């Protein structure tokens, strides 16, 4: 006849073990939830800076631990797309990585405190003239420029009338053709340069 | 009848001939359509007296044949009284830029106290631009021979305002058509009385007014058909203030009517029905103390264009306060500014009225506080708003200036100035256009009706702000978010034309939001969706102003409020 755990005097030990396992599971769950499904910061109360996205020291670990991370998804080519909350409700900041390497990132410059945006002229001093300027952005509008520095791994999206840069993109330095092949999501070269609204 | 009318007709035909030949009016037909009726003199059905009627007028120099002899001019605003207009045909001409009020008066003697009299004159006028209402022409009397036009009693019938459709025969005097010449009927109380002829307008524009053939004589029907204004002791109609205080009519009164020192008096302030938008600015007392009021809670709140509850904006109402009488006589002065309906930013005058416990009400002439017109509107637009209007005539420039003046207490002028030297030229097409290239001028369509012109001006300038002002000024990102949340606010912005850029709706939404906020009285200009654009169930589908309040698009409403008043 088998003895029960209680009869063997092991029940308290089993209960303790169960508690430890359960606590660990809950803790891990909370950790994972925080890391992967970071709660959205409410509009207007966004105080966590996205500046780290521009850092040369940016790592995937930084991204995955960011409280601004909204989602992560696997793309058909095997790369991962991370979307991070930005101040714009309609456009997230974004990182694309593959094999542990960050290939592309975009940072929305608008902030809830309406800080002045960086100027194209400032970038121009550092980066020189862009290799190409494309007029027309799917998101920002037909009059918006994308200034492309493919071999330096930068592109800038902004309003040429006000010299403001709305969005900064960084990517692995490449050729102009390669850039146009890979990172065209927002480019909308159009014939609207002279379009006048009424 | 014929003998009586003939001289007047001849006079007017001569005036018309001269005016036509000098280009003052474009055709005799137009002149007579503005003359609003030359009196046909068949007074008392006594044809024997008719021929002498004008010539026997109790006023001297009734045709102004001797210029302004026996007449004294008065006026407020930019007004000139010119005698003996014309070479062969003398008449009185008033040339003015509105808002204005002015005319002439004459003290007459030898009236019979207790006898009814009536007085009238013929008149014509011309207004520029044609969109403004005709000048109001009135005749008034001071039964004591006083010479202050503000204290005159004005006739029940006037020209240029509401036509008196019942005045086919008034005071025994036949009139022509529904619009009649100014007329007053009164019972003399003294041998002396003063007759006032006055023209006025609250509109911005240029006027010419002609007056002639001033008749004063006994009223054969003894005032049976037209009585002088009566005062209902219970209702106590508000007395008109200075006419230059616009539509406001304020009546001040107290209870008890003959207080003693130490008494508590109740002060009543009543505005006429049409003084909507009158805004209290100040009050002063001399001889009263311990003033207490609950006006702030009693005044029905009105909403200003930016949606703020404005307790100082009040419609027709009886307001009151209580105070203790320290000395007699005491005075109470109430000061207010006039506002257009639902828009207290269109203010032109500061009006003031004083109640003296011994002598009653006195009106202080209005003082301009923020002139809606400018001597050089194009320059004023440049100086005050950074807007360079090129190729528009003076009245269009004035309208543009007046429109932008209504935004002065908002951040709109500051936004414009941050939008890079805005140039506006007449449109070369059938559309008003704004380029995203800030170096190119806005093209504004000229032949809009007035309200559409104002709306289009603000709308296009809204585009300019969207394209050309820094994002810290135009709150670009915030608008992006409210558009993301609520979508477009109007039929126009929701229905892009064929081949429009993909961000059409967002761009138009910004301009529409600004225009609907700054011109709350406007409805949507486009009220029918083009084929292929389904607006069923949309909050803007009724064609009304979608931002009149915050019920339809609260995020847009709040955004506009912050943008324009931040």
Image (tube, coloured by chain):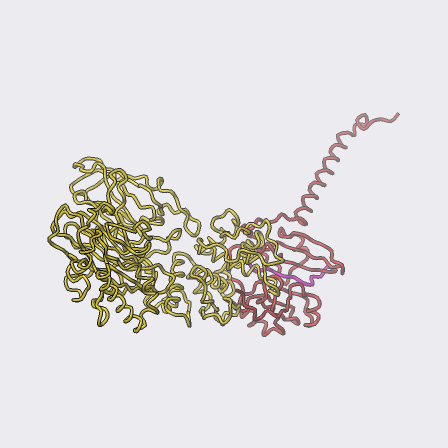
Chain colours: A red, B yellow
Residue at image location 24% in from the left, 65% down from the top: B93
The answer to whether B26 appears left or right of A159 in the picture is left
Residue B284 in view here = no
Q: Is residue A182 above or below residue B536?
A: below
Q: Position of residue B251 (x, y in %)?
A: 26, 45
In which image quadrant can residue B238 be found?
A: top left
Residue at image location 24% in from the left, 61% down from the top: B2
The answer to whether B70 appears left or right of B420 in the picture is left
Q: Position of residue B235 (x, y in %)?
A: 28, 39
Q: Is residue A59 above or below residue B27?
A: above
Secondary structure mainly formed by the magenta segment: strand
In magenta, the rendered stretch is: A99-110
In which image quadrant can residue B121 be found?
A: bottom left
Q: Is residue B91 above or below residue B184?
A: below
Report the front residue among B369 and B72. B72
The quadrant of the image that shows the N terminus of chain A is top right
Report the front residue among B202 and B548. B202
Asked if residue A88 is among those painted magenta in the image, a careful observer would answer no
Asked if residue A105 is among those painted magenta in the image, a careful observer would answer yes
Q: Position of residue A102 (x, y in %)?
A: 69, 61
The answer to whether B6 appears left or right of A25 in the picture is left
Residue B232 in view here = yes
Q: How many marks?
A: 0
């Amino acid at each position: 006849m088998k003895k029960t755990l209680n009869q063997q005097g092991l029940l308290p030990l089993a209960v303790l073990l169960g508690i430890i396992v359960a606590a660990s599971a809950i803790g891990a769950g909370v950790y994972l939830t925080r890391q992967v499904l970071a709660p959205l910061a409410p509009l207007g109360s966004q105080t966590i800076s996205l500046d780290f996205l521009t850092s040369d020291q940016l790592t995937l670990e930084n991204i995955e631990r960011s409280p601004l991370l909204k989602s992560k998804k696997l793309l058909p080519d095997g790369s991962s797309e991370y979307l991070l909350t930005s101040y714009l409700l309609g456009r997230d900041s974004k990182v694309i990585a593959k094999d542990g390497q960050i290939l592309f990132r975009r940072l929305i410059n608008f902030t809830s405190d309406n800080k002045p945006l960086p100027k194209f002229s400032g970038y121009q001093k550092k980066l020189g003239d862009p290799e190409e300027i494309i007029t027309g952005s799917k998101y920002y509008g037909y009059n918006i420029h994308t200034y492309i520095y493919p071999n330096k791994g930068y592109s800038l999206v902004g309003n040429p009338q006000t010299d403001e840069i709305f969005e900064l993109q960084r990517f692995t330095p490449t050729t102009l053709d390669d850039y146009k092949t890979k990172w065209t999501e927002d480019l909308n070269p159009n014939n609207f340069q002279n379009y006048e609204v009424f | 009848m014929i003998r009586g009318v003939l001289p007047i007709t001849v006079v007017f035909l001569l005036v018309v001939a001269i005016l036509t030949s000098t280009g003052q009016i474009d055709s005799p037909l137009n002149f007579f359509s503005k003359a609003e009726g030359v009196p046909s003199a068949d007074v008392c059905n006594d044809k024997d007296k008719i021929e002498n009627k004008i010539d026997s007028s109790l006023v001297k120099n009734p045709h102004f044949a001797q210029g302004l002899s026996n007449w004294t001019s008065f006026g407020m605003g930019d007004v000139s009284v010119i005698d003996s207009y014309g070479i062969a045909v003398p008449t009185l001409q008033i040339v003015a830029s509105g808002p204005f009020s002015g005319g002439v008066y004459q003290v007459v003697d030898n009236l019979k106290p207790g006898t009814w009299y009536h007085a009238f004159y013929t008149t014509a006028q011309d207004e520029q631009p044609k969109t403004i209402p005709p000048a109001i022409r009135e005749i008034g009397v001071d039964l004591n021979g006083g010479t202050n036009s503000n204290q005159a009693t004005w006739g029940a019938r006037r020209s240029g305002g509401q036509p008196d459709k019942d005045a086919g025969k008034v005071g025994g005097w036949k009139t022509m058509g529904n619009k009649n010449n100014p007329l007053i009927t009164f019972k003399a109380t003294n041998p002396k009385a003063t007759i006032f002829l006055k023209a006025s307008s609250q509109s911005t524009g240029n006027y010419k007014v002609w007056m002639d053939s001033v008749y004063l004589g006994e009223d054969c029907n003894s005032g049976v058909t037209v009585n002088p204004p009566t005062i209902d002791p219970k209702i106590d109609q508000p007395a008109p203030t200075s006419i230059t205080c616009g539509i406001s009519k304020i009546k001040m009164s107290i209870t008890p009517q003959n207080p003693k020192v130490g008494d508590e008096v109740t002060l009543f302030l009543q505005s006429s029905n049409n003084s909507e938008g009158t805004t209290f600015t100040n009050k002063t007392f001399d001889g009263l103390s311990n003033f207490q009021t609950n006006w702030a809670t009693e005044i029905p709140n009105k909403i200003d264009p930016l949606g703020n509850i404005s307790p100082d904006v009040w419609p027709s109402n009886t307001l009151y306060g209580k105070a203790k009488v320290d000395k007699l006589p005491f005075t109470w002065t109430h000061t207010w500014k006039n506002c257009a309906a639902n828009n207290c930013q269109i203010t032109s005058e500061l009006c003031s009225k004083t109640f003296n416990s011994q002598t009653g009400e006195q009106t202080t002439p209005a003082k301009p506080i923020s002139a809606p017109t400018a001597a050089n509107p194009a320059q004023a637009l440049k100086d005050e708003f950074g807007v360079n209007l090129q190729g528009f005539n003076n009245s269009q420039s004035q309208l543009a200036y007046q429109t932008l003046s209504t935004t002065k207490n908002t951040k709109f002028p500051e936004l414009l100035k941050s939008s890079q030297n805005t140039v506006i030229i007449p449109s070369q097409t059938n559309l008003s256009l704004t380029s995203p290239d800030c170096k190119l001028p806005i093209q504004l369509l000229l032949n809009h009706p007035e309200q559409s012109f104002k709306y289009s001006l603000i709308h296009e300038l809204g585009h300019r702000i969207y394209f050309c002002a820094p994002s810290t000024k135009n709150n670009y990102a915030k608008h992006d978010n409210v558009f993301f949340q609520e979508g477009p606010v109007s039929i126009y912005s929701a229905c892009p034309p064929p081949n429009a850029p993909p961000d059409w709706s967002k761009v138009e939404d910004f301009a529409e939001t600004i225009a609907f906020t700054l011109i709350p009285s406007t409805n949507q200009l486009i009220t029918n969706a083009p084929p292929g654009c389904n607006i069923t169930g949309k909050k803007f589908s009724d064609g009304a102003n979608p931002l009149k309040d915050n019920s339809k698009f609260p995020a847009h409403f709040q955004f506009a409020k912050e943008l324009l008043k931040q």
